[in-house]
Image (cartoon, rainbow, N blue to C red):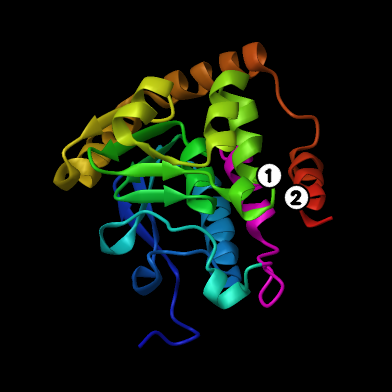
Amino acid sequence: MRGVSDPTILIERHGARVDIVLHRPERKNAVVQQMAVELRDALHTVGDDPSVACIVLRGSGGAFCSGMDLKAAGADLQAEPVTAWVEVHTAIYRCPVPIVVALERFAINAGAALVLAANVVVAGESSFLQVSEMAMGVPAPMCQAWLHLRHSPAVADRVTLLTDRIPAAESLRLGLVSEVVADDQVVARAHELADRIAAYPASGRAGVAAVWRDLRGTLDDPDAWFTALAAGHRR
């Protein structure tokens, strides 16, 4: 039985690569406030370390993330508000280190937001992504934030309005994931790609990132931008 003081995020160092692991396998890595706080802090710690060249974000127990833990928080997230969730996404936006997600089994709602935020996503062939908040009567601000930042309006509307499970092959066609591999190869492939990225010269990674910032632009105040989206969700 998990204790309240047990970590919900694990950090594993492998040379220049760091694995950040969502670690609530008994709840399919569903997000609670403690996990959001620990994930935010892990992203800050790892992102501020100049010796880290790539991050792999994955889940324990062979699954990625089933979304917010509504059993703990209540259907309206009032029993345990996950107030640090916005800070997680601000931390991802500010993180200077590329993030590779290993998508095993599913990424639902809050889990899908983490996938949509990643630079590279390796998905298992039987996995799916789902953004179903609209069917629950609420918007999906963090998913919508990353869909707006990274994808076309047509793809964003398809993902948010249909609310269905999007199989890995369809996610690949839509550009929501980078590649699809056998289910038992997801983590190994994510590690392989992350290690490849980490092995490139630091000047190359920094240079590519700088050019993308010039071409894509940046948010003037990411904290305020993500917070405003979440505030609209809470009204």
Residue 221: image x %, image y %? 80, 36
Classify mark 2: helix, strand or loop: helix
Mark 1, residue position:
141
- Residue at 62% of width from left, 73% of height from top? 74
- Residue at 53% of width from left, 50% of height from top? 109
Of 139 and 142, nearer the camera is 139
Residue 27: image x %, image y %? 40, 71
Number of the label disc, if any, that sits on residue 198: none
Q: From mark 2 to mark 1, how far is it between C-alphas?
A: 6 Å
Q: Amino acid at mark 2?
A: Ala
- Residue at 62% of width from left, 55% of height from top? 136
Number of the label disc, if any, that sits on residue 230: 2
Residue 113: image x %, image y %? 54, 44
Q: Decide if residue 73 is on the left or right side of residue 164.
A: right
Q: Are marks 2 and 1 in contact (CB under 8 Å)?
A: yes
Q: Report crowding for label 1: few under 14, some 14 to 19, many 20 or more residues within 10 A (C-alpha).
A: many
Q: Decide if residue 119 is on the left or right side of residue 41.
A: left
Q: Amino acid at mark 1?
A: Pro
Q: Which residues are magenta?
A: 76-95
Answer whether residue 49 is visible to the viewer in this image: no
